[in-house]
Image (cartoon, helix red, strand yellow):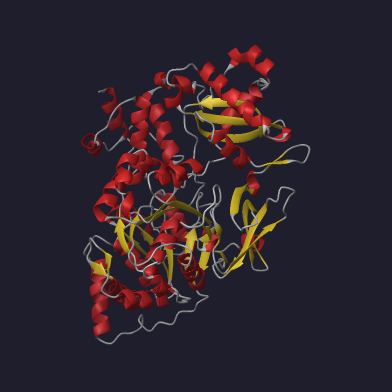
């Protein structure tokens, strides 16, 4: 592949990465819209880093909260290459959780865009250790722009405190708070060696180089974008383009001739709805990569059918973040590829089916959890990181993820049921949009979201009967203890995390478990189905209304359900501002309006969408 011989140089810290790329790619464009070359990028990093040290921030923790932009990435390197430790903050977090991170990590400076200035200034007033709010957009004394100029002047005067700063390969350079409420979220400490090892070894597997143009879609605080795509781009000399609007991705792919993108499965599922447009751009697309959650086999095939290579990988924040990766030449249906070079992998405590917990050891395995010695000792044993993920590995080294250790259902006979395994089989059934497996009273049940387009105007009873017939055939292929005893059907999509993983608690289970405990459900045998076929129930929502009768629900309640599904639990009323109160970003808003269009059978054009600020605005528009 073109340029591949340039890539293989061993680096062990991010300062080396920056110097190497600036020298190797020099006047090559890094950010087209901003007209910034690799050489310009290094100069801006040096200027900013010098100013930060002058401000007394050497060896301090510095945070960033912003939408994706080149300033975010310049700031990243200016912190880790000689100043201190970076703490990326999820821009969708509510004020309380941002404050918790600031307090726990004792953040002394925060870079931000204009959108977050007010919130951060309020937090700053509460904590004396938080000295600076540095804006990407304002032009005050400590703004991003002025600090670049200040640092440039300092360097011209002979200040080399940042440029000559010594970097220890084992030094912690990033603390990343994982998903979950801040109260129980773990903070992962990564060293220079951890991060660089991952980037270098992935580059040996990924078919990308300096000729590629990368589209940045996921938030940079997300490890898939911020550690994987961003640093892989810098290391291999790619050009980078930022897109903060989900519905503009295809336009950007077309306009900038994008060749590479990394995203979560939900993004690829959304894009495929516009497959005719996407197909027209297939000739210049090198490869798309999916991570963060399981990718359906059907989606991979769909993309191949329109001429696009869609590969997937597996990783965790604790592995900075990659463990395994497919490539265009080597992939196997259902697998997440092979382990990346220079990383050891084993399956611990394997059962008779060959399924065991993935444990890994190598330079990219994290240093430990910040201020959490107990969790560190439980997860890191003799250098091996116990991931909590279950998998099988075939004779050729391909890895197949089976689920999480905490999700395993142990039946009374000691047999183990892996929910993800059965869900994958259910999702292949025509008419099944998605499924959730759960256990009650030593029996296996499924909550199934059916595809309305497949069944059109059929009655719920007929839909369930149709699905049950197909499930009976599936049951014949399964051992007795794995067979599905009964199903609950609904039109409402299941709750997921931001990366698209199913939530296995909360509403998803509360609804169905309430039904099971209220009355013994009917058996799946043919005779029982015929006898009790009229007893089909739809899953109930938290207020007891049948989801199949959502058209009779109060508009506000229906909107609450849509917003909660996308944003997670949040306090919603008519006065709630979608952005400032509920914390929705542009990608969230696109998904939310798509759901509203589907739920209320209306069309919201961009002009109308731009005028909507609050929940009440949406209600008025629906009424019209």
Please name whichever residue, 370 or 603, is drawn nearer the observer in this view of the structure.
603
Residue lying at 50% horizontally and 75% vertically, measured from the top left = 171
In this rendering, position of residue 615 left or right of residue 509: left
Tell me which corner region of the image, top left, top right, bottom left or bottom right, holds residue 232: bottom left
Tell me residue 506's x, y (percent).
Answer: 55, 37
Location of residue 491 with respect to 321 vertically, above or below:
above
Tell me residue 335's x, y (percent).
Answer: 56, 51
Please name whichever residue, 300 or 41, is drawn nearer the observer in this view of the structure.
300
The single residue placed furthest to the right in the displayed view is: 413
User: Number of callouts in the render?
Assistant: 0
Residue lying at 24% horizontally and 34% vertically, measured from the top left = 605
Tell me residue 236's x, y (percent).
Answer: 38, 68
Tell me which corner region of the image, top left, top right, bottom left or bottom right, holds residue 607: top left
In this rendering, position of residue 592 left or right of residue 145: right
Tell me residue 324's x, y (percent).
Answer: 54, 59
Please name whichever residue, 560 or 28, is drawn nearer the observer in this view of the structure.
28
In this rendering, position of residue 378 left or right of residue 319: right
Location of residue 425 with respect to 319 vertically, above or below:
above
For the C terminus, the image quarter is top left
* Residue 131 can be seen, yes or no: no
Please name whichever residue, 74 or 249, is drawn nearer the observer in this view of the structure.
249
* Residue 204 can be seen, yes or no: yes
Residue lying at 42% horizontally and 26% vertically, measured from the top left = 453
Tell me which corner region of the image, top left, top right, bottom left or bottom right, holds residue 380: bottom right
The single residue placed furthest to the bottom in the displayed view is: 158
For the N terminus, the image quarter is bottom left
Location of residue 149 with respect to 590 vertically, above or below:
below
In this rendering, position of residue 354 left or right of residue 496: right
């Amino acid at each position: 592949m073109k340029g591949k011989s340039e890539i293989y140089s061993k680096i062990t810290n991010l300062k080396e990465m920056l110097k190497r790329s600036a020298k190797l790619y020099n006047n090559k464009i890094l950010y087209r819209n901003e007209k910034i070359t690799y050489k310009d990028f290094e100069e801006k990093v040096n200027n900013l880093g010098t100013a930060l040290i002058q401000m007394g921030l050497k060896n301090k923790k510095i945070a960033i909260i912003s939408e994706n932009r080149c300033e975010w990435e310049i700031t990243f390197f200016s912190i880790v290459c000689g100043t201190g430790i970076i703490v990326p903050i999820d821009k969708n977090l509510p004020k309380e959780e941002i404050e918790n991170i600031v307090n726990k990590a004792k953040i002394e400076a925060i870079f931000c865009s204009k959108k977050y200035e007010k919130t951060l200034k309020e937090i700053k007033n509460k904590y004396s250790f938080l000295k600076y709010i540095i804006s990407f957009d304002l032009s005050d004394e400590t703004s991003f722009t002025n600090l670049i100029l200040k640092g440039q002047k300092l360097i011209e005067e002979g200040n080399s405190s940042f440029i000559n700063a010594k970097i220890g390969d084992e030094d912690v350079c990033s603390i990343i708070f994982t998903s979950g409420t801040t109260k129980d979220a773990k903070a992962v400490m990564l060293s220079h060696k951890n991060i660089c090892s991952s980037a270098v070894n992935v580059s040996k597997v990924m078919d990308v180089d300096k000729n590629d143009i990368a589209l940045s879609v996921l938030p940079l605080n997300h490890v898939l974008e911020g550690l994987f795509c961003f640093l892989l781009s810098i290391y291999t000399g790619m050009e980078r383009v930022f897109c903060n609007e989900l519905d503009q991705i295809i336009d950007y792919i077309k306009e900038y001739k994008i060749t590479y993108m990394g995203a979560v499965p939900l993004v690829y599922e959304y894009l495929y709805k516009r497959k005719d447009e996407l197909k027209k751009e297939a000739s210049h697309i090198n490869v798309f990569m999916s991570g963060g959650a399981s990718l359906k086999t059907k989606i991979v095939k769909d993309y191949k059918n329109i001429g696009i290579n869609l590969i997937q990988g597996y990783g965790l924040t604790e592995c900075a973040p990659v463990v395994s990766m497919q490539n265009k030449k080597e992939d196997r249906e259902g697998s997440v590829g092979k382990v990346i070079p220079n990383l050891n992998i084993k399956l611990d405590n394997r059962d008779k089916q060959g399924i065991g917990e993935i444990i890994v050891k190598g330079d990219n395995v994290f240093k430990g959890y910040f201020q959490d010695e107990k969790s560190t000792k439980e997860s890191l044993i003799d250098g091996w990181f116990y991931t909590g993920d279950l998998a099988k590995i075939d004779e050729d080294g391909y890895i197949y993820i089976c689920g999480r250790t905490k999700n395993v259902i142990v039946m009374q006979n000691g047999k183990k049921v892996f929910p993800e395994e059965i869900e994958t089989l259910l999702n292949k059934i025509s008419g099944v949009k998605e499924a959730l497996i759960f256990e009650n009273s030593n029996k296996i049940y499924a909550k199934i979201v059916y595809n309305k387009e497949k069944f059109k105007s059929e009655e719920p009873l007929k839909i369930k009967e149709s699905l049950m017939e197909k499930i009976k055939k599936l049951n014949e292929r399964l051992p007795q203890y794995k067979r599905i005893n009964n199903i609950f059907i609904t039109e409402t999509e299941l709750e997921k995390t931001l990366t698209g993983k199913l939530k296995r608690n909360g509403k998803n289970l509360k609804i169905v478990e309430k039904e099971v405990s209220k009355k013994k459900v009917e058996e799946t045998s043919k005779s029982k189905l015929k006898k009790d076929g009229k007893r089909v129930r739809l899953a109930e929502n938290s207020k007891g209304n049948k989801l199949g009768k959502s058209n009779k629900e109060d508009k506000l309640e229906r909107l609450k359900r849509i917003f909660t599904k996308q944003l997670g639990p949040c306090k919603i009323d008519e006065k709630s501002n979608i952005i400032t109160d509920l914390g929705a970003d542009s990608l969230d808003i696109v998904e939310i309006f798509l759901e509203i269009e589907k739920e209320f059978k209306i069309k919201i054009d961009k002009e109308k969408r731009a005028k909507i600020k609050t929940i009440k605005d949406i209600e008025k528009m629906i009424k019209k």
